[in-house]
Image: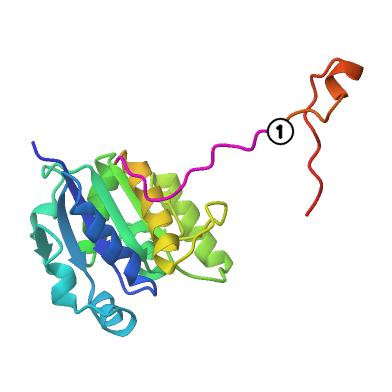
Amino acid sequence: MKKRIIVGISGASGVIYGVRCLQLLKQTDYETHLIISESGKLNIEIETPYTPDEVMSLADFVYDHKNMAASISSGSFITAGMVVVPCTFKSLSGIANSYSDNLLVRAADVVLKEKRKLCLVVRETPLHKGHLRLLSMAADMGAHILPPVPSFYHQPKTIEDIIDQTIGKIFDYFGIDNSLFRRWSGEAVGPPAGFAAASGGGKKKRLSPV
């Protein structure tokens, strides 16, 4: 059976993460099943140089947000899981409360009930306690919370470098081999000159504060 993954793009700012995820998934052996909310389509037009039709063309299968009879609404349709990228707090609330009034939330609910992988790339800041409560509820149900928080140890040079690092984290979660960012391998810290001879070694050199 071909490996399948569901991609949901909701109306949060940062829809370029969803676009880039689809672009990179085309380079894998995964079959992509896409849902874009109406707000997601609007944000694609506002925030990116793409049209919703261009984004939908990146996927193998595309579903209407309101089509509750779609294949991905059933647990008998086998997938590797789902990523919602980006994920609004409205979508998060529906998922956390099992309030499946659209296909994106229903597909996510199916993934959770079937114990498959669900990655929520939640895009909002700052967060109040209601937001935090919803995140905790979703995590308790088995969702993987992955905000698009950039790292800088790999010294990104472009916005694409920052975006790809988050997509790399998503791919890592699903076990999709990638080299989208330079991985941290630790910093070798040896003893200062003469330290080992004088003390027998065994201690790491203390790094000076920046």
Taking the view exactly as shown, the residue that stands out farthest to the right is 198
Q: Position of residue 178 (x, y in %)?
A: 33, 44
Its colouring scheme is rainbow
Mark 1 is surrounded, within 10 Å at the Cα level, by few (under 14), some (14 to 19) or many (20 or more) other residues, namely few
Q: Position of residue 113 (x, y in %)?
A: 27, 44
Q: Decide which of 138, 37 is in the foreground and name it.
A: 37
Residue visible at 27% across and 78% down? 44
Q: Quadrant of residue 188?
A: top right
Residue visible at 28% across and 58% down? 21
Q: Decide which of 190, 151 is in the foreground and name it.
A: 190
Q: Which is the main secondary structure of the residues drawn in magenta?
A: loop
Identify the residue position indicated by label 1 in the image: 189
Q: In the drawing, does residue 47 fall left or right of residue 41?
A: right
Q: In the drawing, does residue 125 fall left or right of residue 121?
A: right
The question of residue 187 being in magenta is answered with yes
Q: Quadrant of residue 152?
A: bottom right
Q: Position of residue 46 (x, y in %)?
A: 31, 84
Amino acid type at circle 1 is: Val
Taking the view exactly as shown, the residue that stands out farthest to the bottom is 46
Residue visible at 20% across and 50% down? 27
Q: Decide which of 92, 192 is in the foreground and name it.
A: 192
Q: In the drawing, does residue 200 fall left or right of residue 51?
A: right
Q: In the drawing, does residue 106 fall left or right of residue 156?
A: left
Residue 41 in view in this figure: yes
Range of magenta residues:
177-189
The question of residue 101 being in magenta is answered with no
Task: Please state, as top left, top right, bottom left or bottom right, where the N terminus lies in the image.
Answer: top left
